[in-house]
Image (spheres, grey):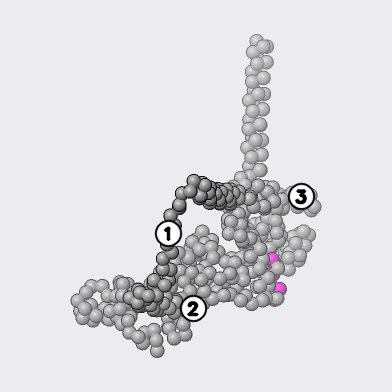
């Protein structure tokens, strides 16, 4: 009977220990948090003012919990209270809250009462992760792996050249040997009589001379006409800008609308050059790119982080505030029409609803912006002849569409049928 009681007691102790271990493990996991969820919460709530490794509007947050515990003796409860309502802590006279508020120019931190304890734990778990190692290309040191294919091709070409040279020398030696053998045997070698030189025969034939002169005149006229027709056509023009800007990343990967930066294209003749303030709407919080994006830039020979620093130098931003020391950026114009040609962006973008890619090409794929279309008069006229005007839900064209559709007997109207070929539309 005593043995049974002993076994029951042992079983109860084991069950109790298992429950305590399970409870402790669960609390430990909750305390450690989920870095993946913490990253999402950090980007949604904190990234506009904080970075992990650099100060921005607020201090850097890498290992913030450990630093506060070690340097200030502050625990998780203090951090939770600060995140949820920093203004209340400052008002209560908390020493460190007052100190950090004064150090950052009395900039109030946004309150986040909606964040639960677990949310804050996840965010702190994300900030506690070690800093990732920088991406090194080509096996380290940033060195380019040499390409031996060029050396191999040169070696093969050199060997072939030597072989052909030896064959030519061999043929000359064989000819000399045969001539000597013929002389020794008394054999006469037949020799060709020298005829009239080719150039003299050509000069003496007046018909060939006349045909050649006419051909040269026509060919010269054709090439001269083609040369002058290319004057002022800069298709493929791809200048290097003072600050590298990747349309592939901004318009492609990030899907930023063209008219967010070129906002005047909706209401003005010109699309306009975006001011640096437009850039800083995003880059005030984005001072460096992801390692994967940085590696992509190196394939194009560009350091995106260095280009962002050029932007900061131009706009006068030191990472936390504007210094007032701004410098103008001398952008190089890519698309440039002659002064005698009139083109209105708003008429095509807002009224006609034409996409930017129609004229500027696949901008979302361009690492460096270049002129995609020739922008010649013939190119514009062909577009007016082939493009149907979008009249659906467009009150601007309602009346004129009714009149001209009856006149031409068609349901769809092209820009040419609406006067798009009149000289005064573009030249006045």
The answer to the question of whether label 3 and label 2 lie on touching residues, with beta carbons closer than 8 A, is: no
> On the image, which quarter does residue 393 sit in?
bottom left
Which residue corresponds to the image point at 73% horizontal and 68% vertical from the top-left? 105
The mark nearer the N terminus, 3 or 2, is: 3
Mark sitting on residue 336: 2
- Residue 77 image point, x, y percent: 70, 50
In the displayed structure, does residue 318 sit left or right of residue 388? right
Residues 9 and 164: in front is: 164
**Within 10 Å of the Cα at label 3, are there few (<14), some (14-19), or many (20+) other Cα atoms?**
few
Residue furthest top in the image: 1
> Callout 2 environment at 10 Å: few (<14), some (14 to 19), or many (20+)?
few
| Residue that label 1 marks | 192
Packing grade of label 1 (10 A; few <14, some 14-19, many >=20) is few
376 relative position to 398: left or right? right
Residue 354: x and y in percent read 39, 71
- For the N terminus, the image quarter is top right
Earlier sequence position, callout 1 versus callout 3:
3
Kindly report the distance in space between the C-alpha atoms of the residues bearing marks 2 and 1: 66 Å
Disc 3 versus disc 2: nearer the observer: 2
In the drawing, what numbered circle is on residue 415?
none
Q: Position of residue 384 (x, y in %)?
A: 33, 76
Q: Secondary structure at mark 1?
A: loop
Q: Secondary structure at mark 3?
A: helix
Q: Residue furthest front?
A: 186
Instruction: Tell me where the magenta segment starts and ends, as one range.
Output: 319-324
Q: Is residue 379 visible?
A: no
Q: Residue at x 62, y 47 (%)?
A: 35
């Amino acid at each position: 009977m005593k043995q049974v009681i002993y076994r029951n007691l042992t079983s109860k102790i084991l069950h109790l220990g298992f429950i305590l271990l399970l409870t402790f493990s669960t609390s430990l996991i909750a305390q450690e948090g989920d870095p993946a969820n913490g990253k999402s919460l950090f980007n949604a709530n904190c990234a506009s003012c904080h970075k992990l490794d650099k100060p921005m509007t607020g201090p850097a947050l890498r290992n913030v919990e450990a630093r506060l515990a070690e340097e200030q003796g502050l625990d998780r409860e203090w951090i939770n209270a600060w995140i949820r309502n920093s203004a209340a802590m400052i008002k209560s006279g908390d020493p460190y809250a007052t100190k950090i508020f004064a150090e950052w120019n009395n900039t109030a931190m946004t309150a986040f009462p909606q964040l639960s304890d677990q949310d804050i734990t996840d965010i702190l778990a994300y900030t506690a992760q070690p800093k990732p190692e920088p991406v090194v290309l080509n096996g380290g040191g940033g060195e380019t792996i040499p390409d031996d294919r060029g050396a191999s091709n040169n070696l093969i070409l050199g060997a072939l050249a030597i072989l052909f040279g030896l064959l030519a020398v061999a043929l000359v030696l064989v000819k000399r040997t045969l001539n000597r053998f013929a002389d020794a045997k008394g054999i006469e070698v037949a020799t060709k009589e020298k005829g009239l030189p080719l150039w003299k025969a050509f000069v003496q034939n007046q018909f060939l001379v006349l045909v050649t002169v006419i051909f040269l005149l026509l060919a010269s006229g054709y090439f001269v006409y083609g040369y002058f027709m290319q004057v002022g056509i800069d298709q493929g023009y791809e200048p290097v800008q003072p600050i590298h800007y990747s349309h592939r990343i901004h318009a492609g990967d990030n899907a930023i609308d063209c008219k967010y930066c070129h906002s005047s294209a909706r209401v003005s003749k010109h699309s306009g050059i975006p001011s640096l303030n437009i850039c800083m709407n995003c880059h005030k919080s984005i001072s460096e790119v992801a390692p994967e994006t940085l590696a992509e830039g190196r394939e194009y020979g560009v350091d995106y982080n260095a280009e962002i620093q050029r932007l900061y130098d131009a706009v006068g931003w030191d990472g936390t505030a504007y210094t007032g020391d701004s410098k103008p950026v001398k952008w190089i114009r890519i698309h440039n029409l002659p002064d005698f040609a009139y083109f209105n962006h708003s008429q095509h973008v807002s009224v006609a609803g034409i996409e930017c890619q129609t004229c500027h090409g696949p901008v979302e794929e361009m690492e460096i912006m270049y002129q995609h279309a020739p922008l010649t008069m013939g190119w514009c006229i062909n577009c007016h002849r082939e493009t149907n005007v979008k009249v659906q839900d467009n009150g601007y064209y309602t009346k004129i569409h009714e009149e001209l559709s009856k006149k031409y007997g068609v349901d769809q109207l092209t820009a040419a049928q609406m006067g798009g070929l009149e000289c005064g539309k573009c030249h006045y």
